[in-house]
Image (spheres, rainbow, N blue to C red):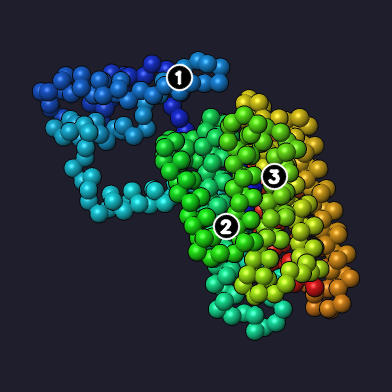
Amino acid sequence: MDSLIVGSFTRPNSHNLSAAVLLPSLRNSIQGSKFKEWSLIEGICNVRYQRQLVENHTITGQRKHMLSPTYSRKRLVVACHGQSLESEPNAYEPKNIWNSIINFLDAFYRFSRPHTVIGTALSIVSVSLLAVQKLSDFSPMFFTGMLEAIIAALFMNIYIVGLNQISDIEIDKVNKPYLPLASGEYSTGTGIFIVTSFAILSFWLWSVVGSWPLFWALSVSFVLGTAYSINLPMLRWKRSAVVAAMCILAVRAIIVQIAFFLHMQTHVFGQPAIFSRPLIFATAFMSFFSVVIALFKDIPDMEGDRIFGIRSFTVRLGQKRVFWICISLLQIAYAVAILVGASSSFLWSKLITVVGHGILAAMLWRSAKSTDLSSKVAITSFYMFIWKLFYAEYLLIPLVR
């Protein structure tokens, strides 16, 4: 679930491919090779390749065979020199260990859906600043409380986006083949272990902090994120376009704004709960933005959603119509934001919010007009641009007074 809490890999298409086809060219590529055991090596390598064949069931039920990408030419050459086919002589050198660490971190980076992680962290920082009334509020207690909320929310964010990937492996093979579960870098068991661990860590951190607004923020996000993705009776709410949008709106527009604001105001500062003008503006504006994210995230994924029966608004109405609905909603939100900024009694707030939202609205329109709606790459790029606008809004919200 990309939006809550906020290169593709080329696969061989060959059928019935065996090592017997590849070995002659490999033999010729080794200069000066005179191995009497070559016939034996060919037989061994052929058996090994056959064992590495992977069955990939296509959407139509036909089966495709492809060689495992981890069984490479390098291993065949090593085998020809008398090395074991199952290991390499430098497998445990520090460089290889370091490469393994880098690959693991890269896969986890993609698994965590970093654009949602950044959005979650920025939103909590922004909402926390709304609770500040005077300079003396910037104390170690403030920064500690804010950091506790950010870490707990990021743990929950990883649980939610990870659970969505576990539930959508086959869909992601079409829509997002670069994700670790869809590409095969992570097994399903690894994905389950990660999401379970981070959910436990999130609630454990709450038990240490003891903030009830934080508890409700995590609990509601956990319930909605699970119901959105998990494929159980009465659940997997993402199959309904309206319910899916409501889930994202509830978390992004309401829970993040109100619960984390109350965490700072009541738990950290010990003040009574008061819904200020900036908080009401933030909740209203992010309601528009959350609906846009909920609608737009399905535009690049229309192909896979249609195949697997996800009746999103994009599948029902078409990419172009949903695209311009999203642009219209954001432009309305920016127009309202400009009016709110113009009504401020503080000159500095009036100037910053009016000019800032005007610039963002102009950037949005210019980028939308130049987007090629027939290109999935262009649409995906524009979707990430919307997330950048989302980040920019959280920089402006604390300045609304």
Q: What residue does disc 1 label?
A: 64
Amino acid type at mark 2: Ala
Marking on residue 247: 3
Extreme residue in the bottom direction: 136
Residue 193, quarter of picture: top left
Location of residue 107 in the rendering, given as x and y in whole percent from the top left corner: 44, 46
Marking on residue 320: none
Amino acid type at mark 1: Lys
Q: Residue at x 47, y 37 (%)?
A: 181
Location of residue 210 in the rendering, given as x and y in whole percent from the top left corner: 56, 64
**Label 1: how many residues lie within 10 Å, few (<14), some (14-19) or many (20+)?**
some
Instruction: Give the vertical position of 232 relative to 128 (above or below).
Output: above
**Label 3: how many residues lie within 10 Å, few (<14), some (14-19) or many (20+)?**
many
Instruction: Give the vertical position of 356 relative to 198 (above or below).
Output: below
In the rendered view of the protein, which quadrant contains the C terminus? bottom right
Instruction: Check disc 2 and report its element: helix, strand or loop.
Output: helix
Q: Residue at x 55, y 35 (%)?
A: 167
Q: Are marks 1 and 3 in contact (CB under 8 Å)?
A: no
Amino acid type at mark 3: Cys
Horizontally, residue 46 falls left or right of residue 272, namely left
Q: What residue does disc 2 label?
A: 153
Would residue 9 be visible to someone looking at this image?
no
**Label 2: how many residues lie within 10 Å, few (<14), some (14-19) or many (20+)?**
many
Q: Marks 1 and 2, Cα distance to the nearest angstrom?
A: 41 Å
Along the polypeptide, which appears first: circle 2 or circle 3?
2
